[in-house]
Image: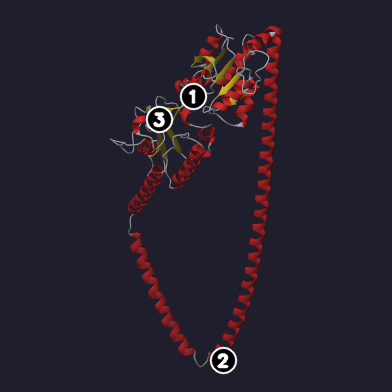
Amino acid sequence: MALKRALVVDDSKVARITLKNQLEAYDLRVELAESGEDALELLKTHMVDVIFMDHIMPGMDGLEAVSLIKSNPATATIPVMMYTSKEGEVYVSEARALGAVGVLPKRVEPGVLFGMLEKLGLVKDRRGKSNGGGTDAEGEAADVGDKPLGIEVSRVVSRILEDQHIELRSDILNSYRGFAKEVAVELHDQMREDQRIEEVEQELARRQQRTWRVASILLAFVVVIVGMQWLHVRSERDAAMAELSDARAALEQERQAATARQEQLATITTAEQSSFESAERRQYLDRLIRDMNAAGAVPFYEVPFNEARVDDISWLMLRLTDAGFEGTLQIESHLGAFCLVSDASGIYQLEDADAPFTSCSFIGHPLDGSRLLSDRQTSHFEFFRAASPLLADSGIDLQVVIRDRTDSVPRVPYPDNPQTAGDWNRIAAINNRLEYALLPGDAL
């Protein structure tokens, strides 16, 4: 039986080789292309049974390539699976609308990949087959001889469309549930806010009543005191006038002292005040950047620019805006050199912490040769950079610098004589980080 053919289209060499190794483990012959244009040129002379298409690539992106493949009668029936780190229901729906059968993540599990290939009829799970009635090769030959090829393709296409319909219906239901949940939470919050406002209004009314009651008591007390004083006013008029004169003299002295203090404060120049405020603000901004760098380590299995980094950067930009900073916030992504081993699928993993350091098959990082931001960001972070009001209206520019292994600067030196893989990887985890800085020329 001839081997099934697969085409992997990705501008990342690491991603192409990783998926190629996984597919070849299932006896598939794999062709490689590093761009949408190369994939279309290859399909003119080579027919394949399935295509794995990356989304973001230089030149023609993955969705444009899928549209052209599906518009060509010679390649329209080839199943296309989007193979990308991009997420979200809108993206999945857009990919399927153009003809893709589904979306796989870049770090796809072997079981998920096998299930997808099995649905497409490219591999078979023989664990549940009975041994009676002839060999598998004879059964396959009988199937090929008895059934027309068009019927087999029709069954595969029907199964794909049925699976796509089920997944699309599930996506729509999940969207409705999420929307209903958001509406319910918003209504609940609004009811709580209305209740809080009502409680505040009631408290203000009670305080106003107490204030009027106290004022009435004080007024009555004042009237009594005034009446008693009036009875003695004639006999004590001279003494009261003398005390009033002394009080006026004391007030005049206090007024003159206050005027002198104001004149002394006015001698401080505006430049001195500005210099003091600038020094305080610089210390505050330096402390913010120092705290961000102290917490900038990125775990090995985590994408550096993800949802958590969006929250951290948003928090930082709000503090910079409050401090009156205007300029450029630069974030550099540095790679750590990890002690790695290759698993059965050809994917590099962290070596066991207790294993000797000499058991490492590779010292480095899977993204050693990559300077592409698309390899280190999620779609959530990409949307934040494109549409966040913090970047549009704050007067602060966000500059992201991607460092590969050749120019990544370690924060902590690596040990000279590590005993175990864990000793080495603890240092690599510190060096695998984001580095924050305020560029020269900012308004401090």
Q: Report the colour scheme.
A: secondary structure
Q: Which of 357 and 150 is in front in this view?
A: 357
For mark 3, give the secondary structure.
strand
Mark 3–mark 2 CB contact (< 8 Å): no
Residue 433, image x, y percentages: 40, 37
Residue 378, image x, y percentages: 51, 32
Task: Give the answer, above or below, for where 444 lies relative to 13.
Answer: below
Residue 282 visible to the viewer: yes
- Which residue is under mark 3? 340
Task: Give the answer, above or below, for where 328 lies relative to 80.
Answer: below
Q: Nearer the viewer, mark 3 or mark 2?
A: 3
Q: Which of 418 and 250 is in front in this view?
A: 418
In space, the residues marked 1 and 3 are separated at their CA atoms by 14 Å
Which label number is shown at residue 231? 2
Say whether residue 64 is left or right of residue 319. Answer: right
Q: Reading the chain from its start, which is encountered first: label 1 or label 3?
A: 3
Type of amino acid under label 3? Leu
Name which quarter of the figure residue 442 lies in.
Answer: top left
Q: Quadrant of the C terminus?
A: top left
In space, the residues marked 3 and 2 are separated at their CA atoms by 100 Å
Residue 163, image x, y percentages: 68, 24
Say how many tags the image has.
Answer: 3
Which label number is shown at residue 264? none
Q: Which residue is drawn at 38% across and 27% down?
A: 361
Type of amino acid under label 2? Leu
Residue 129, image x, y percentages: 65, 20
Q: Residue furthest toward the bottom?
A: 235
Which label number is shown at residue 345? 1
Say whether residue 96 is left or right of residue 267. Answer: right
**How packed is label 1: few (under 14 Cα within 10 Å), some, or many (20 or more)?**
some
For mark 1, give the secondary structure.
loop
